[in-house]
Image: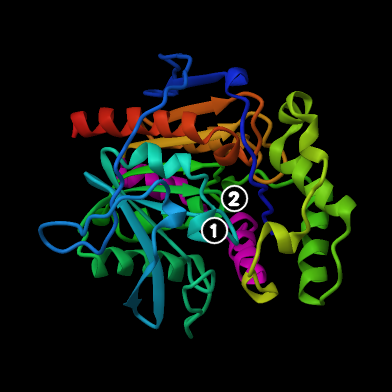
Amino acid sequence: MYYLPKIKGNKTSVFIIIFMFIIIIPTTAMMMTTTTTTINPVYGQQDKTSFNVTYSSNIQSIPAKKVQVGDIEIAYKMLGKGDPILLFNGASDGMDQWDPSFPRSLSSNHTVIVFDSRGLGNTTTGSQPYTYQQLANDSAGLLDALKIPKADVLGYSLGSYIAQQLAIMYPDKVNSLVLVGSSCGGKDHTPKPPEFLKLQAEVVNKSLNNVSISQEEMKELVSASVGSGWIRLHPEVLENIPTLQQAKPGLSPEAMNNQNNVGKHWEDNPNWSGACDELAKIAKPTLVITGTDDNMYAPHVNSLKIVEKIPGAWLVQIKNAGHAVMDQYPEEIGKILNTFLSTTAQSN
């Protein structure tokens, strides 16, 4: 189970270093700053020539649409203009749980697609086995239903595993790959600390058995999510911690267990070589982002392993950020992503 609180960053404390890896040699370092922009996001189902246009201040206020994909109905939203980018949520998160500033920062020059994964939010569960291969099939089917032949793809946490699988199974549908808080899985995966694995298992079991999760357990999950540097800068984050039901409204125990099992199978399968070697073969432009304090959910050494395997991959390490990096620094990550996408577009 991956609990990620919704939090805001202190913009003056951001310290971001970007490394461009060619033969695993860092060649670039830069500091990101914050600016404010005004955009007119749009949404609608894509046809062969255009999008239906409306105006909105953020993605949460856009009404969801649904489309049939195989055995399920997928709920989705689209906003922005330009080349499409498909966003994969973290575990147990619906499409409205992205920090609003992140899709907004992309939507001035990209068509941003967010959706509820199988069994989450307003997307039905269907009858197919719940595996990361099936979740990749679902997302490929969504692109087909929206008449999008190819897209940039971003995956966060568990969503990064599905994004990798999409790129492996459907390389012609993926233009570039962005992996945040990720791992190659299999034998290359560096596991979570045993005490944290035990905590996660206890929380899932309690949820399945309708047993209350203690405030102390939630505090441990939050601490692991944001990391020690963030807590030092923002000690208030450990005050007034919500319950799991408040943090994940509408999440059923079964859906949480399904998501947890997919993550465990990706990370803890020693008989599988992992995804990195296959990703290296297809050699898509790849950006890897990690918080330097992500030591529990997806130990940040896993991100370094991805970059070591994929020729030309970019690595971004964000200081004083944990696994919740997408919520800690959403605007900064949006700027990094725009730089990456514009650079790789020029080179293609």
Label 2: state its secondary structure.
helix
Give the residue drawn at x 86%, y 72%.
211
Residue at image x 63%, y 70%?
A: 250
Q: Magenta stretch?
A: 256-284
Whether residue 78 is situated above or below residue 16 in the rendered picture: below
Where residue 156 appears, as percent x and y from the top left, is 51, 48
For mark 1, what is the residue? 272
x%, y% of residue 110?
A: 28, 43
Nearest to N terminus: mark 2 or mark 1: 2
Asked whether 235 falls inside the magenta stretch, the response is: no
Q: Amino acid at mark 1?
A: Trp
Disc number for residue 187: 2
Q: Are marks 2 and 1 in contact (CB under 8 Å)?
A: yes
* Residue 215: x %, y % from top left: 87, 54
Q: Which one is nearer the viewer's eye here, 195 or 154?
A: 154
Residue 230: quadrant of the picture: top right
| SS label for mark 1 | loop
Q: Please identify the quadrant where the N terminus is shown.
A: bottom right
